[in-house]
Amino acid sequence: RHKVIFDTDPGVDDALALYYLIRHPQVDLLGVTTVFGNAPVALTTRNARFLLREWGHGAPVHAGASGPLTPDMPPEAFPTHIHGENGLGDHPVDLDPTDDPDDAAQFLIDMIRLHPGQIRVLAVGRMTNLARAVQMAPDIAGLVRDVVIMGGAFRVPGNITPAAEANIWGDPLAADIVFGAAWRVVAVPLDLTTRTFMDRSTLNDLGARGGPGMRLVADLSQNYVRFYQAAGYDGMLVHDAAAAVCLTDPDLFTLTTGEVRVLSDGMALGLTLMNPADRQGPMGAWQGRPRQFAALEGQPQAILDRIAQVC
Ligand code: BDR
Ligand code: CA
């Protein structure tokens, strides 16, 4: 079984990913850590608690970073046009925003040390909590089983700027730290997730016929689907849920490997650059970095089918 900690900024696609994890028979969800991103951390934490309560799951929720590690970032503009004012597509949420201590990084450290070689972290928001955890306790890099992230745009344009994908753009220095630590990172980037969309009728069918909590996911996804349809997609991009499938069903993904750097200043802020495996010669800023992995290719339809099966 997979012992998973879910680091997230719910977030509509985060909600689908969380439901997938909860429903998956091989996943033990040991905790949820939250981060700013789709909404302020007081809201993403509240949203995580709300979803777990609605689905009757007792995983602890630990609040994390309210802003980036990267210096001199422009003030965060939350993507209310995609995830709603409340982060859950403006679906009613009957819980107040939280005012929790920021202890997500410490929780990650404690859990990874408690279960050496076993914890799988699925990080689908800014990488701030993970970066802080590995800075505070470098030993966890050798103790975690792996880190699967949704993030990056390696050979396709970003979704925030032409250079950058949202989770990386929101804290590029944190992402550079995560790709540079001596653990195994598998990124599920826009290269694949922009080809992995669920159309409205599939979503609504799943809401009607899926597990008992799937109705809520379908309901809170309605504005999100509308946004993606207006943007020219034939359905909603399931980004974070695709990364969850990568954790449970790696065979559906084709990994490219190489050292990764993330630009943390300048006009291409948040650009993810991987050194291709066959490069000879000078390595510059890539020298000495660990080889990491990016799922640039995969089987979008099989990924969606897997989500439908589990949820
Ligand atoms: C990522 O950004 C967030 O808005 C989504 O939840 C997803 O994690 C996609 O770029
Ligand atoms: Ca997310």
Image (cartoon, rainbow, N blue to C red):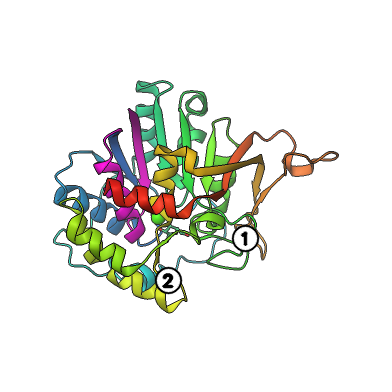
Crowd around label 2: few <14 · some 14–19 · many ≥20 (10 Å): some
Task: Tell me where residue 166 appears, x and y as whole percent.
Answer: 50, 60
- Tell me if I can see residue 87 in this picture: no
Identify the disc placed on residue 280.
Answer: none
Q: Say if 104 sits above or below 46 in the image.
A: above
**Mark 2 highlights which residue?**
234
Q: Between label 1 and label 2, give the one nearer the viewer.
A: 2
Q: Amino acid at mark 2?
A: Asp
Magenta span covers which residues? 1-26
Indicate the quadrant where residue 218 lies. Answer: bottom left
Tell me: 174 left or right of 210: right
**Mark 1 highlights which residue?**
269
Please report the residue visible at 41 percent of the width from the left and 72 percent of the height from the top: 228
> Which quadrant holds the N terminus?
top left
Assign a secondary structure to mark 2: loop
Instruction: Residue 157: say if magenta.
Output: no
Tell me: 241 left or right of 49: right
Where is ligand 1, by quadrant?
bottom left
Task: Tell me where residue 172 appears, x and y as whole percent.
Answer: 57, 53
**Which residue is nearer to you in this view: 145 or 49?**
145
Task: Tell me where residue 203 appears, x and y as whole percent.
Answer: 29, 63
Which residue, as the protein is rendered here, is positioned at the far bottom? 230
Q: Amino acid at mark 1?
A: Leu
The total number of labels drawn is 2
**Which residue is nearer to you in this view: 263 or 56?**
56
Q: Earlier in the sequence, mark 1 or mark 2?
A: 2
Please report the residue visible at 46 percent of the width from the left and 76 percent of the height from the top: 231
Please report the residue visible at 29 percent of the width from the left and 37 percent of the height from the top: 31
